[in-house]
Image (cartoon, grey):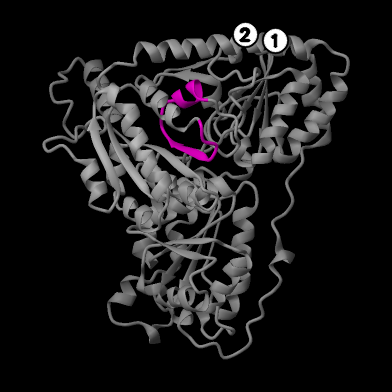
């Protein structure tokens, strides 16, 4: 780093340095040419290091994957109005999944005196944050260089305050490129730390414990508990103290599936008389069964079951998007951060359950139910092991055979839960939480962001990616190869948008109409896409497509060898229904 801040954009880099922001996924834009110069010259391209991306959605999604694993924001850089529009889907996905990041865009000079004809006018908005204001936690457009420190300090603080999320800062190209003509005070950023976690109301916490201790079949459903890795061990202790079964509702790894009290995939919810939701974003999704086609929803809980909802959902609601889901009646709703609430519940429950034999009995019963569920999954996997197209359970089995001896992988993607049924998942941080909006185009770059997060520790990411998702952002592969980011990508090739095709089929059948043209707008064939060729064209090692299950293990082994030895992306296309 040069010894002195000389230009307006140097101040931005100085603040990012103070916060030790590691990476800046970037799609180049002339409206932050000043900032780019400062990053590579004033900042020596270290902390943050630029990660070159070929699309703004890729840049933001890589930042999301990195943040999901580390809990820390990256600084995603996008071009003014047009770049923000390109990035908006990924920003929305980060907002819905409560993922912290700082999105920074350039904007044309607000002073008309500095605007070139046409180009600086069509790339300047008043105010640019309006483009994404409905799905970021906060946005700002600092007026001048003097305003930058407080703007960025507040941005970091807001992004990292639970419930976390993206923030957006527009950086005027005018002051970015101005020489500093006065001292810009840079405060001690440690004096502006995010507020401490919210503890639950003591009376409500005591009532939760009373209900759990008095229950016959208590159950915990864990949603985003695992975003704080240390809280996984706290949740295990809470479950053991009360002999309480736990269902992992997805997202990050919340509860080890090797534990006897893991009840994921069992009928524990139908049997429970008290259900405690911890950081569950969509209670309705966790407590109902539904048909994706006819929209019929059925409650899975007993009529007399009591529901308790603990988390921070009500602190993250905006009026634009219905990401909060349906209102679900509950005996208690407690605003609390699980990282501090779970240890306190454990302390209180230890007192309430002292001398009780119920925890041991529940644990024994839970172990039996878990063993039954595991055997059922193994039997189903064996039944479909030789199918063509290759089944998801066979993909899960083959991937596990190749990675189970390692302890430094992280999984990202969609296997319809087969990885949790068949693998031993007991390491916090081993599962990347999914996005919040099922957004096509965000899955592959999120996985690359996860690979970036574990790269320095010698880890790698295993990503299961849809063919449709990949074709939104194929340039993600170039970024991973260019920056030596270790990712094994398995592309599930089913000729296009099968989910949407099933919707079309169901609708036509429901209306007593022909399904002869159900392929229109849903099949990506004629020509078929060679996904491996796309990867090879960008410097990646790639194989496939393969449709013989007998070839799968060896193909995965070859690709994984490249990932681990060369620290890069390798891709395997698998014909899968």
Q: What residue is rendered at 24% in x and 42% in y? A: 532
Can residue 93 be found in the magenta stretch?
no
Picture quadrant of residue 115:
bottom left
Q: Residues within 10 Å of mark 2 (few under 14, many from 20)?
A: few
At horizontal 84% and vertical 13% (from top left) the residue drawn is: 356
Q: Which of 104 and 142 is in front in this view?
A: 104
Which residue position holds label 2? 368
Quote the CA–CA distance across marks 2 and 1.
7 Å
Residue 183 horizontal/vertical position (percent): 63, 87
Magenta-colored stretch includes residue 418: yes
Expressed as whole percent of the image width and height from the top left, the position of residue 340 reads 75, 40
User: Camera-side residue: 306 or 48?
Assistant: 48
- Residue labelled with disc 1: 364
Q: Is residue 144 above or below residue 360?
A: below
- Report if the CB atoms under discs 2 and 1 are less than 8 Å apart: yes
Image location of residue 107, percent across then percent down: 41, 72
For the N terminus, the image quarter is: bottom right
Q: How far from the left and from the top, in percent, is residue 197? A: 73, 47
Residue bounds of the magenta highlight = 405-423
Q: As drawn, is 299 to the left or to the right of 510?
A: right
Q: Is residue 442 above or below residue 551?
A: below
């Amino acid at each position: 780093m040069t010894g002195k801040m000389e230009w307006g954009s140097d101040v931005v880099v100085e603040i990012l340095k103070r916060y030790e922001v590691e990476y800046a996924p970037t799609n180049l834009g002339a409206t932050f040419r000043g900032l780019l110069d400062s990053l590579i010259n004033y900042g020596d391209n270290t902390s943050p290091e630029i990660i070159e991306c070929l699309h703004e959605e890729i840049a933001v999604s890589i930042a999301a994957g990195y943040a999901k694993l580390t809990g820390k924001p990256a600084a995603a850089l996008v071009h003014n109005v047009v770049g923000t529009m390109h990035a908006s889907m990924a920003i929305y996905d980060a907002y819905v999944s409560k993922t912290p990041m700082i999105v920074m865009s350039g904007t044309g000079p607000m002073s008309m005196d500095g605007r070139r004809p046409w180009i600086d006018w069509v790339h300047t908005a008043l105010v640019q944050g309006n483009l994404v204001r409905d799905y970021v936690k906060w946005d700002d457009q600092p007026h001048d260089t003097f305003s930058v420190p407080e703007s960025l300090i507040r941005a970091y603080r807001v992004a990292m305050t639970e419930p976390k999320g993206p923030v957006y800062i527009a950086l005027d190209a005018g002051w970015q490129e101005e020489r500093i003509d006065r001292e810009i005070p840079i405060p001690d950023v440690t004096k502006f730390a995010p507020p401490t976690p919210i503890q639950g109301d003591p009376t409500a916490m005591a009532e939760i414990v009373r209900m759990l201790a008095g229950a016959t079949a208590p159950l915990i459903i864990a949603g985003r508990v695992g975003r704080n890795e240390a809280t996984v061990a706290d949740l295990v202790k809470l479950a053991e103290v009360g002999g309480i079964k736990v269902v992992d509702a997805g997202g990050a790894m919340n509860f080890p599936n090797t534990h006897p009290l893991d009840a994921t995939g069992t009928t524990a919810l139908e049997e429970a008389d008290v259900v405690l939701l911890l950081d569950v974003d969509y209670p309705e999704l966790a407590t109902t069964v539904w048909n994706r086609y006819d929209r019929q929803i059925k409650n899975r809980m007993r009529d007399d079951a009591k529901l308790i909802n603990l988390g921070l959902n009500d602190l993250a609601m905006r009026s634009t998007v219905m990401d909060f889901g349906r209102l679900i009646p509950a005996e208690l709703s407690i605003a609390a951060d699980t990282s501090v609430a779970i240890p306190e519940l454990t302390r209180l429950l230890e007192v309430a359950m002292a001398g009780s034999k119920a925890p041991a009995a529940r644990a024994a019963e839970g172990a039996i139910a878990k063993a039954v569920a595991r055997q059922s999954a193994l039997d189903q996997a064996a039944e479909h092991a030789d199918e063509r197209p290759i089944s998801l359970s066979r993909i899960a089995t083959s991937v596990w055979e190749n990675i189970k001896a390692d302890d430094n992988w992280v999984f990202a993607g969609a296997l319809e839960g087969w990885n949790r049924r068949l693998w031993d998942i007991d390491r916090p941080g081993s599962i990347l939480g999914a996005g919040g909006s099922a957004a096509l185009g965000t899955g592959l770059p999120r996985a690359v962001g996860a690979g970036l997060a574990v790269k320095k520790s010698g880890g790698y990411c295993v990503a299961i990616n849809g063919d449709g998702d990949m074709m939104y952002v194929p340039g993600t592969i170039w970024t991973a190869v260019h920056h030596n980011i270790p990712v094994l990508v398995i592309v599930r090739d089913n000729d296009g948008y099968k989910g949407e095709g099933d919707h079309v089929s169901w609708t036509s059948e429901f209306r007593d109409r022909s399904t002869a043209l159900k392929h229109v707008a849903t099949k990506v064939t004629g020509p078929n896409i060679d996904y491996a060729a796309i990867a090879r064209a960008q410097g990646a090692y790639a194989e496939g497509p393969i449709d013989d299950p007998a070839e799968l293990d060896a193909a995965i082994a070859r690709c994984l060898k490249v990932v681990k030895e060369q620290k890069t992306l390798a891709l395997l296309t698998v014909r899968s229904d």
